[in-house]
Image (spheres, helix red, strand yellow):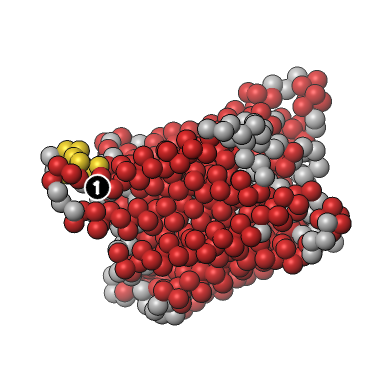
Amino acid sequence: MANLTRNSCFALLVFGLLSLMYVQFSAAGSINAGISSLWHLDTSQLPLLKLHFSWWPRLVTTLLAGAGLALAGVLMQQVLRNPLAAPSTLGVASGASCALLLATLYAPSIVAWSSSAVAMVGGLSAMAVVFLLAWRRGLSPSIVIVAGLVVNLYCGAFSTVLLLLNLEQLNGVMIWGAGSLVQTNWQDAQYLWPRLLAAGVLAALLIKPLSLLELSDEGAKSLGLSLAKLRILCLGLAVFITASVVSAVGLIGFIGLAAPALVRLLGVKSLASRLVLAALMGALLLTLTDQLLQLLPGVMAMMIPTGATTAALGAPLLLWLLPRLKFTQQRQSIMSHQTEVKPVAKSTLPLLLFGLVVVVFLSLLVGQQQAGFSWLFSHQDWQLLALRLPRLAAALSGGLMLAVAGVLIQRLSGNPMASPEVMGISSGAALGLIIAIFTGLGSSGLALYLGGAIGALATLALLVLLNRRSGFQPERLLLTGVAITALMDSVQNFILVGGDPRAYQVLAWLSGSTYYFDIDNLGYIAAAAAILLIAALACAKWLDVLPLGEASARSLGIKVDQARLVLLVLVALLTVAATLVVGPLSFVGLMAPHIARLLGFSRGKDHLLAACLVGMLLMALADWVGRQWLYPQEIPAGLMAALLGGLYFMFALRRL
């Protein structure tokens, strides 16, 4: 029965591909003419020229790229014993892309010499960071994937900084980075096929030792297998395959996860069969997606990148796979690694207030000008104060709201690694805002807020729906956030390569720039932050009782379901308001509650107030440093906070 299902699935994919090829050949006049255009150049008809110079090279390149990514995914999953391991989830692809962007800007001669070498260095570096973060937990599948999420987000934030600072130089790179498979010759196919052939032969030679990894480590060692050497060799091979594909066609999302997962679900157990069938599945999936995109009308077929499309399709696949995953090997969950709480020193709160005052003073009165750093008093240019004050207010308000949302979600879920950014709530809010902007519904501030609120609430509903049966297991919550964030990234790529003039404004907003705020927005921002903080403080009793468990909370007279619903809605509103101000990625929602707890603030009300001070301090400092570091160019506050916060997240994850 399994063989029948498997054969039917592959037959359906092949039939779909042949049908799409028939459509292309029909447009050329006849099937025979379309097939002969592969090796024969007929200059008499434009469709045949298109087939010869573009369509056939694109078809072969797509088949090779899909097969290569699927092969890399199988190798990673087999070595790590992790069904979610893939080039896109381990940060390998984003690390390779980030390295190529850096080299394109600062060492173009190295890219001209060997782009695959640059990509491989980036991919290996990203994987090394992931392993370093997860090593203390024995490369636990959930921790590996969360570490991969952090590396992906960090590389994405760094790449966005490079893009904002070098728009003209990297304008064409954006399309490549989104996974564009548009071809004008056979160069990419000729580049890929010998590398993938060599990698496939080496993978075939490693089938027998790789099969032994299905045993325990002790069992494999007893048979004379060197686990360390085998893992290094296989993961190096997977990174080489990924780097080759990324350097040729850019980022292709989730094929390396989808193809091996579907082959497993079809009942294929033999490693040799999985390698072959996954490669075939990956080639068919990517090619079908690409062929369907080419049938879109007009410029849409040219502007929608295939890589971003597969990422958008892969995010629902990951959400579908999550309920089917088992975390039986990890008896210790992230929840059990609570942050060590110290007694609160009497001077802690005054020190936080003093630090915040110092940062506010710096933001308002000190800054770079053409002559260097100067005090506002020295020039008596009080007009600068009118420009700096709204930006400072926006940064303070955004930091406060993210900190409050972080406290609420961490105490509600019992997960110290949770935050609006990590769990995908900020990405959901950003999706809602982007949809409102590009559909024309977001013509006013209120409409934008409603669009963001719907996106955040939908994300929260999805989190609850997918994780309620498992008791809101922290690993599953974080992995759900991985999928939602991946969907957000794919939508962002659609926007950037679409050619819409609103794209750069959206990019600046997504990066968390406070540049667009003026004195007229000051009252609205401050009022929203104050009202939401008061509402959160009114729920402080729930924050103390709910972590004790549902039974204890009910015995104290708390209506648990209603309390959770109110807190979730409050998280959504805080996240939307903060996302409007500082963008969807900053990690302040993770850092501020974490630092406040490290300082000893464990009671609900105290935790909220201390986290607010820390959040405001961090975001205001990020805004000031971002404005001064590369003056006259500017790093937006949200991205600056993400670059700093990503390092803190890695540090916190390393200590688990």
Q: Quadrant of residue 653?
A: top right
Residue 357's place in the image compared with 543, above or below, is above
Q: How far across and down, in percent of the image, does residue 208 sit? A: 72, 32
Q: Residue at horizontal 67%, vertical 45%?
A: 603
Kindly tell me whether residue 174 is visible in this rendering: no
**For the C terminus, which image quadrant?**
top right
Q: Is residue 353 left or right of residue 161?
A: right
Query: What residue does disc 1 label?
Result: 633
Residue 22's place in the image compared with 3, above or below, is below
**533 or 66: which is nearer to us?**
533
**287 or 438: which is nearer to us?**
438
**651 or 96: which is nearer to us?**
651
For badge 1, the amino acid type reads Gln
Q: Residue at horizontal 48%, vertical 71%?
A: 449
Q: How far across and down, in percent of the image, does residue 429 sit? A: 52, 64
Residue 562's place in the image compared with 120, above or below, is below
